[in-house]
Amino acid sequence: MSPKISIDLCKHRLEQAKENIEEAELLYSAKKFKGANNRAYYSIFHSIKAVLSLEPIDFKRHKDVIAYFNKNYVHTEIFPKKIGHMIAEANSIREDSDYDDEFIVNPEVTIAQINTAKELLKCVEEYINKTIGNK
């Protein structure tokens, strides 16, 4: 993958992450908490994928994306350690929201999920701006 394609893909994934947060906030305001959890998680996922697009690596499975990010970016303290815990919690909430028919979601959990997505996106944007600048 050429650097230009990687940068373009990175920017595309950042835009996806931002759209996902907007969708999460709209769903939250409509009291559609399960859907809001899903969209907030996907903002997190696309934020991580934006970072990984700057490397010649990609994964199909979510758990592989998260594991690689944690190993190479969180454990090396490129991103704060607390982000790794927040990502794990967000993934668990998304899976429960999407797949557990008996999972009861509440507004506090959902707004925390949205805030996690926003915090990660901010960290990712700062990292990408330092890494690629205005390319």
Image: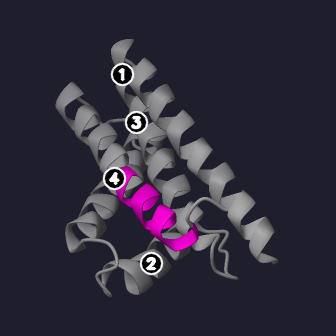
State the residue at coordinates (37%, 46%).
Answer: 117
Under tag 1, what secondary structure? helix
In the image, residue 67 lies at what x, y percent? 45, 78
Q: Residue at x 71, y 59 (%)?
A: 9
Q: Which residue is mark 4?
A: 90
Which residue was labeled with disc 1? 28
Q: Nearer the viewer, residue 31 or 43?
A: 43
Determine the residue located farthest toward the top in the rendered image: 30
Query: How many angstroms separate mark 4 from mark 1 (CA)?
Result: 16 Å
Q: Amino acid at mark 3?
A: Asp
Tell which of 52 and 131 is nearer to you. 131
Q: Is residue 129 left or right of residue 103?
A: right
Residue at point 46%, 69% (across, down): 130
Q: Which residue is mark 3?
A: 101
Badge 4 vs badge 2, beta-carbon distance below 8 Å: no
Give the alpha-carbon distance from disc 4 to disc 2, as whole Å.
Answer: 14 Å
Q: Is residue 129 magenta?
A: yes
Pointers 2 and 1 in contact (CB under 8 A)?
no
